[in-house]
Amino acid sequence: MPLATTLRAGSLNCVFSIETEGPVARITLANPKRRNALSLELMQRLTEALSELGQKTDVGVIVVAGEGPAFSAGHDLSEMVDRDAQFYDDLFAACTELMDAVHAVPQPVIAEVAGVATAAGCQLVAACDLAVASTEATFATPGVRIGLFCSTPMVPISRAVGRKRAMEMLLTGEPIGAATAAEWGLVNRVAPPDQLRAEVDKLAARITRYSDHTIAIGKRAFYRQIDFSEPEAYELTREVMAANAGTADAQEGIDAFLTKRSPSWSGRRGS
């Protein structure tokens, strides 16, 4: 088993750790007393951390998790009282930049959701490429209850679960359980609490079997085509596949399949 290394960073309202073990980097929101609230500083630091991990050639998958009973309860409401317009603009710009960073890194990002994920916390789950939830996890966009509609969370949530289901979450603020979240497409799979991390590790291990270069190509193309019209999406993906087909890893994979052997990826991180 590879030795894990851990870095811990942050001020009182900006605490998280980064642990690397083999090709998997795990970012853990580590402020359970504040339910891992996404303060302005925390979102900025998380964006920086993702950007740095995205450049590491020995990282193939990034996991985002949370300590305590909450994955994240969303924005830190205590810093949102009696602020000027510029602060609010900066806050939601930082939130958008964090979600964009999840999509921008070449590695797949997996949300590991052990507990509550609400508002911007639910947004972060929806923005991640994959999500695994504990059977005890719940998800909600309760902003309507405090007069602050979850407008930015609706962006990835509506794309994950569809219009009618997203509107139900947004208009009622009522939470949904892990089984419903899986049925609606907000998470990929559900596991008992004591098996959650093992399930995430299993999913990460499946991904890191393959060429990281190929996965990065596919992830980038996925988010570029997802909101295109069908003709535009085909035009883009035709070009991407044509370029991908000529890469060393594609040629190695095809030859390995034809000759019935295991491929040796040149694009494999850490190889």
Image (cartoon, rainbow, N blue to C red):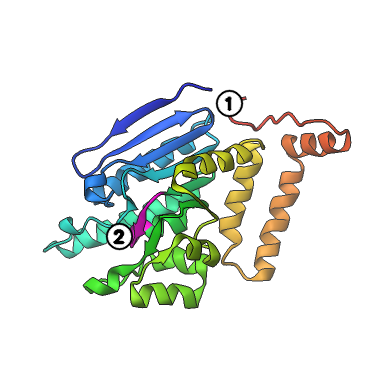
Residue type highlighted by circle 2: Phe
Q: Is residue 19 above or below residue 153?
A: above
Residue with the mark numbered 2: 92
Secondary structure at badge 1 equals: loop
x, y percentage for residue 118? 34, 60
Q: Give the range drawn in magenta.
A: 114-121
Q: Which residue is drawn at 50% across and 46% down?
A: 109
Q: Which residue is drawn at 58% across and 63% down?
A: 226
Image quadrant holding the C terminus, namely top right
Amino acid type at mark 1: Gly
Using residue 264 as the reference point, say whether residue 34 is left or right of it. Answer: left
Q: How far apart are marks 1 and 2 (CA)?
A: 36 Å
The percent position of residue 30, horizontal first and vertical second, equals 29, 41
Pointer 1 with pointer 2, Cβ within 8 A? no
Q: How many labels does the image show?
A: 2
Which residue corresponds to the image point at 34% horizontal and 77% vertical from the top-left?
Answer: 172
* The image quarter in which residue 73 lies: bottom left
Residue reaching furthest left? 82
Q: Mark 1 points at which residue?
A: 270
Residue 70 located left or right of residue 56: left
Mark 2 element type: helix
